[in-house]
Image: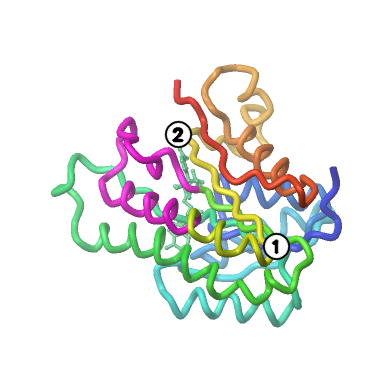
Amino acid sequence: MRLDEHRVVVTGAGRDFGRSLAISLAELGAEVFLAARSLDAVERVREEIRGEGGSAHAFACDLGVPASVAAFAAAVSERTDRIDVLVNNGAPYLQTGGLTAADDEQIVDTIGAGATGTVLAVKHFLPLLLASERPDIVTMVSACGETGHHRSEAHEAFYAAKSAQAGFTEILSKRLRPKGVRVISLYPPDFDNPDRRSEEWAAEREAQDELSARSLVDCVLFAIGQPRDCFIKSFYFEQR
Ligand SMILES: NC(=O)c1ccc[n+]([C@@H]2O[C@H](COP(=O)([O-])OP(=O)(O)OC[C@H]3O[C@@H](n4cnc5c(N)ncnc54)[C@H](OP(=O)(O)O)[C@@H]3O)[C@@H](O)[C@H]2O)c1
């Protein structure tokens, strides 16, 4: 599969899963528009991709700051008249020993960037997506967004943020389907993020039966690579 004609936005692309996904997309020929809170971090990813002949652009975006999300979308729209895929990947993780152990600011950041930031990203990128002939919105939710899930050590605010993403993408998939947009959501349990270029990355999937970041990258690539009649709405994973 090649993605040569695809223009893809990835949030939280400065490290970990977002970086791995961005590099994989670019290897398949996609032009990637990458954002992270730290411009330095995402510029390093951009240079990694360009160093291997890929096409990448870097932007600063703090999903917890509405003006920053709007500015990111505006900056991307100066470079392209359409986006084919928006990947809502960036979201802060919060793990503490109980509801009262996190301070108020951590709770506001977790829900603000994870939930509100995702809604705002879709809102501001929707015009560019609707200019595509094959628009997809991919969201890295979490098993924490599944009703009744309780097996993560994540803070309650993280559960709240991921449940909000789940509710948002659910209604979005219904409302945007008539406009030709596939809204694809992934609900993975905890997974490790070995460096995309490390031997662990290559060996990860074979070495253990826990869900690997590499397999999740493959899920995203598979879903967006399907013809338009094949709308894979959600990926759920059995937790070990
Ligand atoms: N790893 C897991 O076990 C797991 C399981 C289920 C779902 N997920 C979801 O999958 C996605 C990627 O996971 P990951 O393991 O790569 O997460 P991670 O290691 O916790 O990294 C979080 C990512 O989100 C970005 N981010 C955090 N706050 C942000 C903000 N205010 N504005 C913009 N970006 C922000 C981070 O960027 P900075 O560099 O700026 O901090 C980083 O790129 C996340 O949505 C996560 O919730 C992960």
Give the image location of residue 64, x and y in percent: 40, 68
Q: What residue type is labelled 1?
A: Gly
In the image, what residue occupies the spot 32% across and 46% down? 159
The N terminus, quarter of image: top right
Q: Is mark 1 on a helix, strand or loop?
A: loop
| Residue highlighted by disc 2 | 189
Residue situated furthest left in the rendering: 100
| Residue highlighted by disc 1 | 180
Give the image location of residue 111, x and y in percent: 33, 59
Classify 113 as above or below 100: below
Give the image location of residue 48, x and y in percent: 72, 53
The C terminus, quarter of image: top left
Q: Kindly tell me whether mark 2's CB lies below 8 Å from ligand 1.
A: yes
Apparent side of residue 173 relative to residue 141 in the rendered image (left or right):
right
Q: In the rendered structure, which segment of residues is drawn in magenta?
A: 141-169
In the image, what residue occupies the spot 52% across and 35% down? 236
Q: What element carries label 2?
A: loop
Q: Which amino acid does label 2 sit on?
A: Pro
Magenta-drawn stretch contains 97 = no
Apparent side of residue 76 relative to residue 116 in the rendered image (left or right):
right
Here the colouring is rainbow
Residue count near mark 2 (Cα–Cα under 10 Å), binned few <14, some 14–19, many ≥20 = many
Classify 96 as above or below 33: above
Q: Which of marks 2 and 1 is nearer the N terminus?
A: 1
Task: Measure how far apart labels 2 and 1 are at the Cα level.
Answer: 29 Å
